[in-house]
Amino acid sequence: MKLNQGCLFFHPIPITVTSKSLPVEQRRTDVTHQYCGNQILNPLDKSTIELEVLNSSPRAIEPSPASVSIKLEEKLKMAESKVNKSESVILEDNTRGSNSLRTQLWARNSESGDEDFPLSNDNTASRSNPSNQPRYDAIAYAEDKMRRKLRFFFMNPIEKWQARRRFPYKFIVQVIKIILVTIQLCLFAHNNYIHVNYTWDNRITFSHLFLRGWDATQEVPEYPPVTGPLSLYKQKEFYETINYALNGYYNLNNSIGSYSYTAEDNSLVPAVLCLYQYKEGIIFGFNESFVFNNEIDRTCLTVNHTFPETHSVDSKKLLEEKDVIINFSALVKAHLKFAVKTVNLKAASPITPPDCYQFNIKIIFDNSDFDGQMLLSLDVESIRLLCKGDTQYITDNQLDSALRTILNLFVILICGISLILCSRAIYRAQLLKFETISFFKKTYGTNLSLEGRLEFLNMWYIMIIINDLLIIMGSAIKEQIERKYYGSDHWNICSIFLGTGNLLVWFGVLRYLGFFKTYNVVILTLKKSAPKVVRFSICAVLIYAGFTFCGWLILGPYHIKFRSLATTSECLFALINGDDMFATFSIASFKSPILWWYSRIYLYTFISLFIYVVLSLFISIIMDAYDTIKLYYRDGFPKNDLQAFVSVCTDEASSGAFRQESEGPDWKDLLERMCCCRKRPYGSIQEGSSDSSTKCDEICGNLVCI
């Protein structure tokens, strides 16, 4: 006998009823009683137990030894009165409170309200048949336990703390990570800006020092450009450009910048000239004939300084001395390469020493189009070196390097912990998903829907894992950069990893804002509108692609904004947003009036269609999703089978009801699996016998006995 909420609970009690009107085989049965005050809440089925009361007293009743001491006459009177009033059995465990009642109501609504509801329970017979009541008790207990487990799984960190006092490790780790990663990004962004800006400024300097014909108007890119590309048109200009570059290189001391040669003793290091020519390329334009072999030969030679008296270089003479003849009709391109070193004093700070750089300079002569215009450009590759400066910076340099290394290691450590915690959470979610699928199949005979299965896949955790991997790789590259062990392109790669990782980290903050109703509207609106937006975007992209290819083909030869497929797409996308419309109309230069009229019709049609139709429809899709979310907040959100199953459990997180459930396998569950067999007494049905016996029955719920 158990006491709970003013009620007395009696487990199945074997009683023997002796009456002249009953056959012998019906005089013994198992009955479950639950007394609340003076009422019996668990009625008995007339078809199972028939009681004959003579003169308000039973003829003969023989309770079994396991029955409780209650007056027999009072028990029979209450049983008779309750049999005629009740139609269902209400099960209630002393540790479950009111959730078992909600379990029955949920199953009853599923049967009466919607015949096709996938979670309709087929245990109706067990409710009206007291002989199946212990089995129904086990099912109700399993349902209630599964609901609590799922309810706890879908709680937010605050509710989990209220439910079981479980510390929100993942939340704390994410807070620490976003602080450390942001600090790391700010420091690297500052250094990267100094590095890139210093490299760009030196590139401008080298263009003035080594490029013949370079003008200050070409330092800042303009659109549309006011001048054409820097080019060569005569063979004499080709040799003069090489001479100008070599003279500037051999006279570094004349420059304002503190540039040195790459040798340890600052001795002159010869420049290298590489020529890329077709193996054969002779053109006879007068009779439209040629001799051509498309195999490219690469010839590289060092250009030594042989004129120390005049400090001037004659590249044509140097090439003739080396028996190198340039056939301009077969020349594809040429590279002139050399390197210089310098020190950036501006980067110095109280704990940061100056930075030392080596610049690998390459002057490019591009004749790949063979159109009489050889494009001239200069490319610079910067490499940061370990400095050997004044001794006063040694201690500070070590301090700065140590602090940055510690920060990088902390970021890698915290991201590793976050990666492990989120991976474990995803793994446990999949285990719970399989357990839920098995439970639905076993209990209701139906499979869990796809929407219900997707509830166990937390995309926030997937995003956190991705940004953890990106930040770990970016931090490792950053550490190599700061130790000067890196290639030329590592700055950009590190920026991509750290920047994208930090972007996803800040996106992850939306997950925690989503716990509040006001901030969750944006996330729910995007989630609701995503399928429609994707379908609409597919149709819009098809129209956009048609306009892009058409504009590239027709307007490309005559319009600077349509020169390539990429620039055409960029131009059209800018037009959708109303950017630079008049310039797009006015820049084009058409000799044919047909093309002029076609370009106007083309641009007007595209702008009108996408601004007034496509964008308006796109906005309406978003607004429709927003209005739907507002209705959901007012009338309730639609629920899939899993959510409907879990919603029956309405216990508050702080009620203490969840502290009796364990989330995953632990030592307690292991002991329960090992000791999951207990004995349940029940009476052996034998004719003319009132003795009861016991028999071992496994009551393990969803556990598997070990």
Image (cartoon, rainbow, N blue to C red):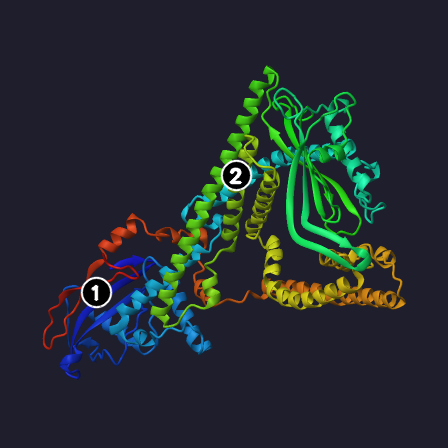
Mark 1 sits on what residue? 70
Q: Position of residue 125 (x, y in %)?
A: 31, 77
| Residue 492 sits in quarter | top right
- 182 sits to left or right of 670: right
Categorize mark 2 by other alpha carbons within 10 Å: few (<14), some (14-19), many (20+). some
Q: Position of residue 245 (x, y in %)?
A: 75, 32
Circle 2 or circle 1, nearest the eye = 2
Q: Report the residue at 60% width, 44% height from top.
A: 496
Q: Amino acid at mark 1?
A: Ile
Mark number, residue 501: none
Name the quadrant of the N terminus.
bottom left
Mark 2 sits on what residue? 176
Name the quadrant of the C terminus.
bottom left
Q: Secondary structure at mark 1?
A: loop
Q: Nearer the viewer, residue 283 or 417?
A: 283
Categorize mark 1 by other alpha carbons within 10 Å: few (<14), some (14-19), many (20+). few
Mark 2 / mark 1, whichever is N-terminal: 1
